Amino acid sequence: MTQRARLAAPLLAALAGSTFATGAFADELNLYSARHYDSDEALYEAFTEETGIEVNVLEGDSDQLIERIKREGMASPADVMMTVDAGRLWRAEEEGIFQGVESDVLNERLPEAMRHPEGLWFGFSQRVRAIYYNPETVDPSDVATYEALAEPAQEGKVCIRSSSNIYNQSLLASMIEHHGAEAAEEWAQGVVNNMARDPEGGDTDQILGVASGECDIAVANHYYYVRLLESDDEADREAASKVEILFPNQDDRGTHVNVGGAGVVADAPNRDNAVRFLEFLSSDAAQEIFAQGNNEFPVVEGISMNAVLESWGEFNKDDLNISVLGENNPEAVRIFDRAGWR
């Protein structure tokens, strides 16, 4: 049975001497994970069933895990760090958390855009940042691109999260790569001018803002919408029924994509097991768990997905290498600050 240790800030020091740090064993893998999805348990159990390697999981947010690995140094038991968003993976990379991996399996299974150029980390699930709109007040052709969100015609209509949100930082990082920093700043300023309210809440709150009439247009990751559509709460399902989803920029670069990803820790005591785990995450079995369990898009083609995702059909996704989103993150943060995006 997978061992779980949940890491919270007040417990960080206390956990430093926990029994989790037991050293290297041929039949175990120590995973530090910033993913908090119950469905991930199925990943660990499937890996153990296939390989006989036990997965010990320590959970926390990305910054906590990065700081813990740095503090533990060469004595860290961590073999793999897993998190969401290329910006967070880049932060770990900058702190020297990862080592390079060369794997024929990963090179063959994963698209080039999902592989760090030096093999420091890899994307195993795709998270699409979509546009949502009220079909009674908005013509979808008027919001068919991210760029359209900054047009004067959308003044007072847009709900979107804070600039401190890593998903928005990565979206702006992609704009910097495609249009340059100056144009990206003009876009950010235009979106600020068009906000229906100051940024507040999470992705779900943006979608609910459209449903309630607080705004006409919103930006959020796709799986939050799926959760509302499939919620046990009738009010959630009713709210989702009032909102339509749109995948932007289909006539040019494609919709912005982010990732859930992982890399092998620099001083991993069970390195071979760590590489084997990453290779497993690219397998059909693991890819289906990502797609069915948390409604993320798989990175490998031909994988069975949740019925809602299947119903959306094929659409163009931006094929920027995900490492670029991290590299442009500092500039994105500066642009947000200058634009007054709270």
Image (cartoon, rainbow, N blue to C red):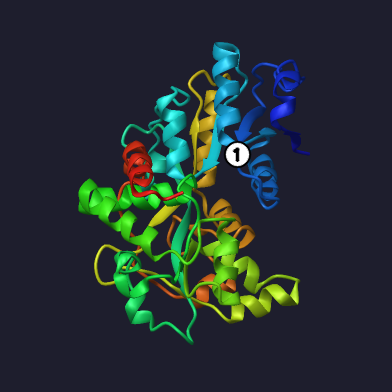
Q: How many marks?
A: 1
Q: Position of residue 86 (x, y in %)?
A: 43, 43
Q: Nearer the viewer, residue 119 or 105?
A: 119
Query: Which residue lies most toward the bottom here?
Result: 136
Q: Nearer the viewer, residue 240 or 31?
A: 240
* Residue drawn at the location 35% of the way across and 51% of the way down: 172
Give the amino acid type for the residue marked by disc 1 in the picture.
Ala
- Which of the image's four quarters has the N terminus? top right
Instruction: Say which residue label 1 marks.
Output: 34
Evaluate whether residue 248 shows in this view.
yes
Q: Position of residue 126 (x, y in %)?
A: 46, 55
Evaluate whether residue 305 shows in this view.
no
Q: With 135 as the anchor, is 200 left or right in this view?
A: right
Q: Position of residue 262 (x, y in %)?
A: 50, 38
* Residue drawn at the location 37% of the way across and 62% of the way down: 193
Q: Could you say which quadrant of the image residue 247 lies in?
A: bottom left
* Residue drawn at the location 70% of the way across and 47% of the way down: 41
* Label 1 Cα neighbours within 10 Å, binned few <14 / some 14-19 / many ≥20: many
Q: Position of residue 220 (x, y in %)?
A: 50, 62
Q: With 200 as the anchor, is 338 left or right in this view?
A: left
Q: Secondary structure at mark 1?
A: loop
Q: Is residue 72 above or below residue 152?
A: above
* Residue drawn at the location 54% of the way across and 27% of the way down: 66
Q: Is residue 177 above or below residue 292?
A: above
